[in-house]
């Protein structure tokens, strides 16, 4: 258990130290913060457009960063022989895979959490169709750049990772600003309970993609892993239309049902459409989606462990 914990912590910090992690986080936050400005004069649809854009940005960037971090960190360890060094110690392949899954999932969930906090702030910035809360908008942009300054200061004074400490700083600043909005800003014309459920459902999607990315990265190199994850992402968006129907041929129906079960359906976690029509999201549906993601993640983790058992780690070292 101690080995698993250390691998998970190291994997988490390695993911945060990847330059692409902070670059994508920085870009996602700026996009989410600018949506209220880009949706002015849209005839009473501003809040819906801001929420839809913020959720889409959060989901796409979170899924992308989970794939990039998993493939680059694990594949790099395969190439430079770090995996061979770890496995030469009393560390099992099961502990290695579980530690990698836990670390990458934690980093991806943190990314999604920061973006969700920014999405709530963006909703508060969008006052109505003709104006926005300029004070909050300017404060949010300043806080994002202040996080960069904090990362630079820590890097200069202590030689720490700029990306890692910038992420910690932006988490504290954005979360603090979200709490300020809850306490001191007038609530927008939107159910905050429903909004919370819609944002929470993004976390299971990120967890599923992170586990898939780790599973592919432990077996394949960077490019094949990214191709497989991208294919599953696009197929999962339309899996209900491709494989969710019923067919007259029983054999074809069985095959398509297997594909429908094997490919993660990202539409289960996408509630922007329900928010657009002010439909209430049942709490039971939230738990059902979390359970679906948990079962799927466990199955993929078992698959990753089984396939990694037969991989020759020494053959990947240079």
Image: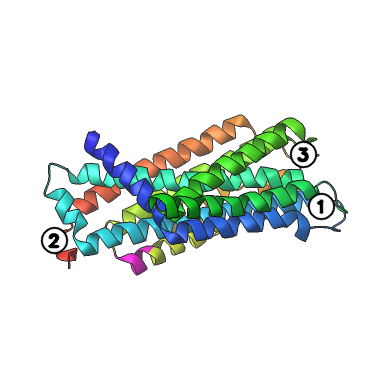
The CA span between labels 3 and 2 is 56 Å
Does the magenta segment cover residue 175? no
In the rendered image, residue 164, in percent from the top left (x then y), is placed at 44, 50
- Circle 1 residue: 45
Query: Per the image, is 224 magenta?
Result: yes
Residues at marks 3 and 1, CA–CA distance in whole angstroms: 12 Å
Q: Who is closer to the viewer here, 4 or 241?
A: 4
Residue 176 appearing in the image:
yes
Q: Position of residue 265 (x, y in %)?
A: 51, 51
Q: Residue 190 carries which label?
A: 3
Say which label, 3 or 1, has the lower sequence index.
1
Q: Which of 187 and 26 is in front in this view?
A: 26
Distance between mark 1 and mark 2 Cα atoms: 57 Å
Check disc 2 and report the residue beneath it: 314
Of 5 and 309, nearer the camera is 5
The local crowd at label 3, few if under 14, some if 14 to 19, many if 20 or more residues have their Cα within 10 Å, is few
Q: Residue at x 60, y 55 (%)?
A: 145
Q: Is the magenta stretch mostly helix, strand or loop?
A: helix
| Left or right: 318 in relation to 65 | left
**Residue range highlighted in magenta:** 221-225
Q: How many marks?
A: 3
Residue 10 placement (x, y as % from top left): 31, 46
Q: Circle 1: is it few (<14), some (14-19), or many (20+) Cα within 10 Å?
A: some
Q: Quadrant of the C terminus?
A: bottom left
- For the point 20% across and 56% down, the residue is 82
Query: Dot 1: what SS?
Result: loop
For marks 3 and 2 on the same chain, the one whose residue lies earlier in the sequence: 3
What secondary structure is found at the residue carrying circle 2?
Answer: helix
């Amino acid at each position: 258990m101690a080995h698993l914990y250390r691998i998970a912590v190291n994997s988490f910090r390695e993911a945060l130290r990847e330059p692409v992690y902070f670059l994508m986080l920085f870009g996602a936050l700026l996009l989410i913060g600018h949506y209220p400005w880009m949706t002015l004069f849209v005839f009473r649809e501003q809040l819906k457009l801001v929420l839809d854009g913020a959720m889409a940005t959060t989901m796409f960037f979170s899924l992308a960063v989970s794939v990039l971090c998993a493939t680059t960190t694990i594949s790099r360890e395969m190439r430079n022989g770090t995996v061979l060094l770890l496995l030469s110690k009393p560390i099992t392949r099961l502990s290695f895979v579980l530690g990698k899954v836990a670390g990458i999932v934690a980093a991806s969930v943190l990314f999604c959490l920061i973006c969700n906090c920014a999405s709530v702030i963006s909703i508060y910035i969008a006052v109505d169709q003709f104006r926005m809360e300029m004070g909050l908008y300017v404060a949010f942009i300043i806080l994002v750049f202040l996080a960069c300054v904090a990362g630079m200061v820590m890097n200069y004074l202590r030689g720490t990772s700029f990306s890692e400490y910038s992420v910690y700083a932006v988490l504290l600043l954005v979360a603090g600003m979200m709490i300020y909005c809850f306490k001191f800003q007038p609530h927008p014309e939107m159910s905050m309970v429903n909004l919370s459920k819609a944002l929470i459902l993004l976390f299971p999607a990120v967890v599923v993609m992170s586990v898939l990315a780790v599973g592919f990265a432990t077996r394949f190199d960077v490019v094949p892993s990214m191709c497989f994850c991208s294919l599953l992402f696009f197929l999962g968006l339309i899996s209900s239309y491709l494989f969710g129907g019923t067919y007259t041929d029983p054999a074809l129906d069985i095959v398509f049902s297997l594909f429908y079960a094997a490919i993660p359906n990202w539409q289960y976690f996408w509630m922007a459409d329900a928010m657009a029509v002010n439909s209430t999201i049942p709490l039971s549906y939230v738990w059902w989606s979390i359970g679906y993601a948990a079962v799927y993640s466990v199955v993929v983790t078992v698959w990753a462990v089984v396939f990694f058992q037969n991989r020759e780690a020494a053959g990947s070292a240079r």
